[in-house]
Each structure stands twice: as structure tokens, then as C-alpha cells.
Image (spheres, grey):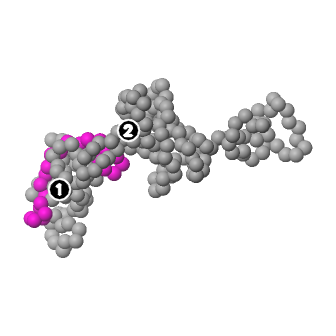
Amino acid sequence: MAPVSGRVGLRTVDVGNVVSSSDANGIALITQVTPIDVVFAVPQDRVGELQQNASASAVMKVTALDRTRASVLDTGVFASLDNQVDTQTGTVKAKARFANSKLALFPSQFVNVQLTVNTIENAVVVPVTALRNGSSGDYVYVVNSAERTVSLRPVKRGQATVDKIVITSGLQVGERVITEGADRLKDGASVVLPGDQPRTGGGGGSGVAGKRKRPASQAAGS
């Protein structure tokens, strides 16, 4: 009987080969696949949050995505954190456990992970491409719909994901912000929005500030 359950790999010997109990490779390698652990890197700046949640016995959801981040392979939970920072990368190794009931995860497979550390309620979020930075700090261009002009609005940023960023102050839900072409704009400039008839002057695409629940952290590591 095998000492563990799992998937048996290709045999390393053929019929007629001489084997002994001291052989390093054995006859075959058994790898556990259900459950399965995924090891990934966490930025050292987020380690404090992870330790606090772990000490409070909070369940942190982890989502495993494929190489292109297009498909969800499985969802699991945060399991453990290493005890030191990798000084070369400024990250700490972490481990998540997945049931892998559909066998979508495979030993030594490369995956991307998203770790939900916290959820911010009723946050105002915009696309990351809308946020600009100048000598006076962060700002966005807000669209004045009636005049088709923009106003430079100082804002304060919060937590961010790969494609969205929380605006903690300076922007209201439903206001439209410029997401493309902002390099050609200045305060009071005229813009052309998607669906408008083309005209002279600077222009840019726009997005709408939204109000939703957003994870405070990004999958991060792979």
C-alpha cells in the first residue's frame, strides 16, 4: 500500500530491471493532487495585514487563475506565511490550499492568484488609467457633460487592484472621468467623448466613477 494518496507518475524502471529499497528514484513518484497547495509571493508591505487576519482566524479567499488570467481554475483559502522576507525580491512566500475537486490544478503548474485580504464597503473606484500624478499630487480629469469640457480635480487614492483604484476623496459616484488622452488635456479643455461627432481640440475616452465592493488587495503574486 502506498504511504500517500495521489497521482502516480510514469514509471522509472522497466520489467527486468533490478531494484532495491535503497534506490533514490524508486519505481514511481506519487504526487498529491487533492487537496493541492499553491505557493506564491506577497509584497512585504502587505505582510502585516496577513498576519493580523491570520491571528484573528479570518478566512481569506484565494482564487487561482490560468497563465493569461482569463479563466478561474479553482478557489481556495489562505493557509500559511513564511517566516522571513526574500531580500532579493522584497516579498514573502505564502501558501494557499485548494480542494482541486475538478483537477484543474496540476503539480508544478504556473498559475496567477488573487488574494482577498479585505473588502472596502461602498468604495468609489475608477480605472487606473484615469488617475494622474502631478507636482501637487494625484488628480483626475472630470467631464462636464453639458459643456464637453474637463476640470482638473485633486483626489486622494486608496487601495488598488490590477485595473481599478479606490478614490477616498475628491470624486463622487457617477461622475465621469477621462481614461484616455489625458496627456493632451489641461483644466477647462474641450473633449470629444465616445459617440460624439469628431471635432478639433483635445479629446479622450471617459469612464464613470463607480460605487461597489472592491477587494483591498490583488492576487498577487504568482
Q: CA distance from mark 2 to mark 1?
A: 28 Å
Residue 38 magenta-drawn? no
- Give 104 or 58, whichever is nearer the viewer: 58
Is 145 magenta? The answer is yes
Quarter of the picture containing the N terminus is top right
Most foreground residue, 131 or 117? 117
> Which picture quadrant has residue 9?
top right
What residue lies at 23% left-to-right and 58% top-to-bottom? Answer: 208
- How far across and how far down the image is residue 17, in percent? 88, 41
Q: Amino acid at mark 1?
A: Glu
> In the current view of this chain or complex, which residue is farthest to the right?
16
Q: Which mark is residue 117?
A: 2
Q: Position of residue 71 (x, y in %)?
A: 48, 56
Boundaries of the magenta span: 144-165
Question: Which residue occupies the extreme bottom position in the image?
Answer: 197
Q: Position of residue 104 (x, y in %)?
A: 57, 51
Q: Residue at x 72, y 40 (%)?
A: 29
For residue 124, which numbered disc appears in the image? none
Residue at 44% over, 33% down? 91
Q: Residue type at mark 2: give it.
A: Val
Instruction: Determine whether the residue tagged by mark 2 lies in a helix, strand or loop.
Output: loop
For residue 140, side relative to residue 12 (left or right): left
Q: In the figure, residue 36 lies in which quadrant? A: top right
Q: Which residue is mark 1?
A: 175
Q: Is residue 146 left or right of residue 62?
A: left
Q: Nearer the viewer, mark 2 or mark 1?
A: 2
Q: Confirm whether residue 44 shows in the render.
A: no
* Type of secondary structure dominating the magenta stretch: strand
In the figure, is residue 196 to the left or right of 71? left
Q: How many marks?
A: 2
